[in-house]
Amino acid sequence: MTLEEKLGQLQQLDGEANGNFRPEHLELVRKGLLGSTLNVRGAQRTNQLQRVAMTESRLKIPVLFGFDVIHGYRTIFPIPLAEASSWDPSLAERSAAVAAQEANNVGLRWTFAPMVDIARDPRWGRITEGAGEDPYLGAAFARARVRGFQGTDYSAADKVLACAKHWVAYGAAEGGRDYNTTDLSENTLREIYFPPFKAAVDAGVGTLMSSFNAINGVPATANAFTLTKVLRDEWKFDGFVVSDYTSVKELINHGFAANEEEAAAAALNAGVDMEMVSRSYNAFGPQLLKQNKLSTATINEAVRRILRIKFRLGLFERPYTDEAAEPNSLLRPESIRLAREIAGRSMVLLKNERDVLPLDKNVGSIAVIGPLADDRRAPLGWWAGDGKEENTVTPLAGIKGKVSAQTKVVYAKGCDVKDESTAGFQEAINLAKQSDVALVFVGELAEMVGEAASRSSLDLPGRQLELVQAIHATGKPTIVVLVNGRPLTIGWIVNNVPAILESWMGGSQSGNAIADILFGDVNPSGKLPVTFPRAVGQVPMYYNYMNTGRPPEAENRYTSKYLDVPWSPLFPFGYGLSYTRFKISNPQLSAQRIETNGKLTVSVEVENAGRRVGDEVVQLYIRDPVATMTRPVKELKGFQRVTLQPGEKRRVEFVLGHEHLGFWNREMRYVVEPGEFRVMVGSNSADVIETKFEVAAKQ
Ligand code: GLC
């Protein structure tokens, strides 16, 4: 390979928004100077560009076509934060597999997913894209999504190369402001932010994407500690790293490089192999070589990593896509059914006073109200792939399709999500007054979550809360359904409205899934993967906090809390209700004492004490109350989703071992320290039964 051909493999360029490649791309590919594109898609288009690479370029190295298939390509599944609410990684594996099949059929062989960033700050719009605040749950979903996208062999005709992103700690952005500074200890990096990436690497993910943020003063896109010491030397990752969109050139904005030449050297030398969209590598690679600021070995290693993945992807053997398969590959009935099933298992019942829900399908009349009752775009979330609004089943449509022919369903938008007008209130109030029950759909627009969507407030935007209050004031039974992509501060609604369903942005089939739950065909079973704060001023707020020297005591002023809100969350991590009732009791341990490398089985009895079949997510937490570093008051180390018939009891078991009980100490070693450990098991992080055991020093 010539130097130019090598540098060409390190270049990814952006196609047109509609999926077309650009004329320049044809020229570059013909000369063997473009290794990858993003956003170019459609079997006919990718084949056209690929044919130039495979028949006209000198070395016939295939182009790698990438796209953001985050939670579906055309069949759009619930946002990842919603899927994480199912606490069922197998569902995420299945949805990723459908996404891979659809993406592959339109010529894509690489998705920039899963996003596995831990997020403890709901002001950050990208909390919507991940699996929430916990590293253990996040790791489980990272593993599942990589397996779903890649399978065991991502050269298969229905698989794609995955990309764990954004490496790393992107979710710790200061103030929840996207792209902002992260400053955190190596212990916190290793305990909280690394685990989902390690799970993805261990699951065989082929690529990672470096993030926009600076980590402790060194931008992630030029950070040799994360990109080489951890990723390569410790984890033995042998895939390749792509930068985020122009994040190489942005090293100049960071003040980490004086110009593109320095930016190129910094990123390549640190371990970013492919440059997304900016062209610093190609523009300055040759002179950096001449000036010995870059070595041939470094360039060769980056090219080798990329070609290794292209070979594993089977691109050389199967560079083209079967254009005949494309039309029948999208929105298959089984894919749509899966989208509905996953949405139904991802939604979280937050409140259901006096069992207001489920509703009777034969109820006389229903007022469906709110700006998100019939919105086709919001349920698809920010990263809607090539999802089409016309394929979205809205809540209004889902409800109409669910109730009996005799039931009268009326609709009023009431207000918009964003603007300040209340002109539509009266119509909504009138319809509510004429109906037996009012369902109010409020939340966020798709543009309010995802990238560059940080919010300084977590309140319902616009006049939506007042709309809910106005409908509630009619005295009619009022149920609120949230359509949103992040935790919201909904205190008034929680205090006054009898039933609340967190539907998230539930994908193409969200309206059907909402109706399935509201009318009892599906028993809600979701659990929050993120803490819901009472006020944005409490943020960052998460369940696995440190106890501090003055843990909060309501009666004692001089303890860690607020004057103006209770210190506790509105809803805790792991919280979610069901239409039935579960009891968790009788914890048993297989031993009272184990050695530091020993194992322990913890079991509890779970009973369905209600009258409906349902799923409970049994959660296991530990605490190391005394250690050589402060440890969280609890850490999730196991969860199991069990389906129980009414009256059924089952003993659920968890195994705890070295990998669960240790932490990274001050010498930066992963250790299990002898002493007491507490075990907590429950239906959410705040409602647990506790027992304890001893870890003894190894004899
Ligand atoms: C964006 C996002 C990243 C995405 C990439 C390509 O800026 O940060 O998640 O995969 O660019 O669209």
Image (tube, rainbow, N blue to C red):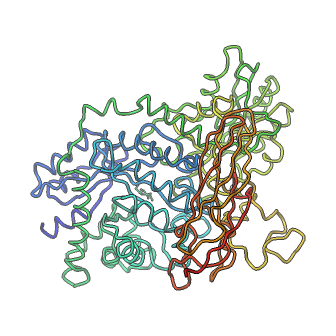
Q: x, y (%) of residue 258? A: 38, 80
Residue, x 25% and y 80% (percent of image)?
294
Q: x, y (%) of residue 560? A: 78, 74
Q: x, y (%) of residue 551? A: 78, 73
Residue 664 as seen in the image, left or right of residue 298 = right
Residue, x 47% and y 32% (percent of image)?
336
Whether residue 69 is situated above or below residue 2 in the rendered picture: above
Number of on-image labels? 0
Residue 349 as seen in the image, left or right of residue 559 = left
Q: Quadrant of the N terminus?
A: bottom left
Residue nearer the viewer, 15 or 555: 555
Q: x, y (%) of residue 296? A: 19, 77
Whether residue 40 is situated above or below residue 579 in the rendered picture: below
Whether residue 647 is situated above or below residue 174 in the rendered picture: above
Residue 545 as seen in the image, left or right of residue 12 = right
Q: Which image quarter: residue 509?
A: top right
Quadrant for ligand 1 reads bottom left
Residue, x 56% and y 40% (percent of image)?
506
